[in-house]
Amino acid sequence: EVPISSFMKLNPMPKVSNINRVDGKRVLEIKSDVLTGVLADKKLKEIEAWLQENPVNSQVTVKFRGEDEDRKESQSFLMGAFTVAMALMAIILITQFNSFYSALLILSAVVLSTIGVFLGLIITGQPFGVIMGGLGVIALAGIVVNNNIVLIDTYDSIKNDFEDKKEAIIRTGIQRIRPVLLTTVTTLLGLLPMALELNIDFFAREVSMGAPSMQMWKQLSVALLSGLVFATTLTLIVTPCALMWWENVKEKLRTKFGK
């Protein structure tokens, strides 16, 4: 046996390493990626559940950054933008219609149309993305408001010509079903290629399905398509029913206080 010191010499040297600090606190970053087809949000929830069952040292603070941080920032921005848009629309509608009920009816159609957005995403198996899904909801609000304004404005202009308010509502639906359906159908036809991931190259004269450039737009188009179909049903059925209900309420109030 030969001692290792016979042919080696050990010299103590400082370890080469970096200590990262943010705001005076030591920071250790752990980075990872997910497999293809796996949602990062799903794995993040699994990690959060694991941390709750296996808590770390109380002096250690765990903070998720990267995609999760960007998603929360985008969500905060879009929620603020949607709130401001709804508030501005409410002010304009109340000013134009001079009726809180008409404004509330139109804005409620915008909120209810989001049910169609989620149903469409569930049926097609698409996750709800904060950016594309949120933009789809905000874009949908403009179309829904326009269709309901057309219907309610027509009713306000002809309701005094009929003693029976039910007949006035039916006449309104007959007059405005064409522009409402035209808006819906033309929008659906325009969004259908994106929803089907259809890519048309006019220069090469090629048509391809599932192009990478179209995948990011699929969620936006599906949200708009499904939400618009659902909102059109609300506009042509629920809105006239709500107008009839309000006329019945006003008639009962007049009868009650008239006595």
Image: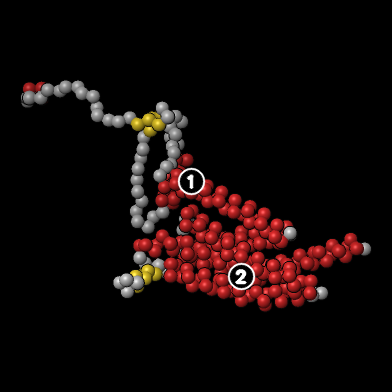
9 displayed left or right of 112: left
Q: Position of residue 198 (x, y in %)?
A: 39, 70
Q: Position of residue 163 (x, y in %)?
A: 82, 74
In what element is the residue under mark 1? helix
Q: Residue at x 34, y 70 (%)?
A: 201
Kindly tell me whether residue 107 is visible in this rendering: yes
Horizontal side of residue 86 vs 34, given as left or right: right
Circle 2 sits on which residue? 233
Q: Which sits earlier in the primary sequence, circle 1 or circle 2?
A: 1
Quadrant in which the N terminus appears: top left
Position above or below: 172 against 84: below
* Mark 1 lies on residue: 73
The CA distance from mark 1 to mark 2 is 34 Å
For the point 35% across and 72% down, the residue is 202
Residue 60, image x and y in percent? 43, 32
Inspect this view and state whether residue 46 appears: no
Q: Residue at x 44, y 29 (%)?
A: 59
Which percent across, then down, holds residue 17?
27, 30
Q: Nearer the viewer, residue 12 or 178?
A: 178
Identify the amino acid type marked 1: Glu
* Three-letter residue code for mark 2: Thr
In the rendered image, the quadrant that contains the C terminus is bottom right
